Amino acid sequence: MKITLLSDDAIRLEPSVGPLTIDAPTAEMTYSPFHMLASALASCTFTVMYSWATHHELSANDLTIEVQWIFGDDPQRVSDFGVVFDWPSLPAERLETAKRVAALCTIHATLTHPPRIDVLASSEMQHEHHHDAAPA
């Protein structure tokens, strides 16, 4: 996969051979935590759509995913995501199904049904190895 940073609030994911690559239009543009979050959403969406396409003998080699986001206040956060896929070879009669499949991504479900997040100091953990311990 290839992730291209389109701006400070947008990325594009496209299929490519080899390891994951991240490209930016300028050396000054850095891969921010927000780009990472959007990349997770794009990658998950791509994976479920690609799997569905393979199961239904459709080519997804021309499938690309773009994710854009908007910041919100009170509290400061990403308040909105927009996920747009471009899939020129997708038969028109499969479009609505493809949109439903895209929404099956686990990251999409996580963002629409937020998890509880516990923030603890390692000294508060009951177990010797904090990564083995469940949140309180």
Image: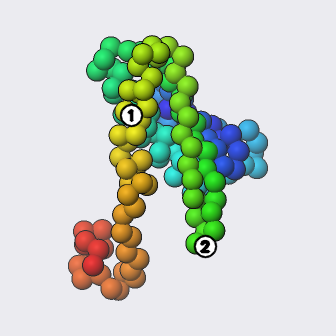
Residue at point 54%, 40% (across, down): 83
82 over 64 or under it: above or below: below
Q: Are marks 1 and 2 in contact (CB under 8 Å)?
A: no
Q: Viewed as shown, does residue 70 lie left or right of 90?
A: right
Residue 9 location in percent, x, y? 66, 49
- Quarter of the figure with residue 60: top left
Q: Which mark is residue 100?
A: 1
Q: Nearer the viewer, residue 76 or 3?
A: 76
Task: State which quarter of the image contains the C terminus.
Answer: bottom left
Q: In which image quadrant can residue 125 be found?
A: bottom left
Q: Residue drawn at (73%, 38%), measured in percent from left and top?
A: 25
Q: Name the residue: 31% across, 17% down.
A: 56
Relative to 77, is 52 on the left or the right? left
Amino acid marked by disc 2 = Asp
User: Residue 22 location in percent, x, y?
Assistant: 59, 40
Residue in the foreground of this view, choosing between 110 and 47: 110
**Is residue 99 something one can see in this rendering?**
yes
- Return the residue nearer the eye: 80 or 15: 80
Q: Secondary structure at mark 2?
A: loop
Does 86 appear above or below 102? above
Would you identify the image quadrant in which residue 121 lies?
bottom left
Eyeballing the image, is 129 above or below 82?
below
Disc 2 crowd rating (10 Å Cα; few below 14, some 14-19, many 20+) is few
Q: Which mark is residue 92?
A: none
- In depth, the one of 60 and 121 nearer the eye is 60
Could you say whether the residue bearing mark 1 is in a helix, strand or loop? helix
Give, as a three-letter code, the residue at label 1.
Arg
Residue 85: % across, % down: 53, 30
Residue occupied by mark 2: 74
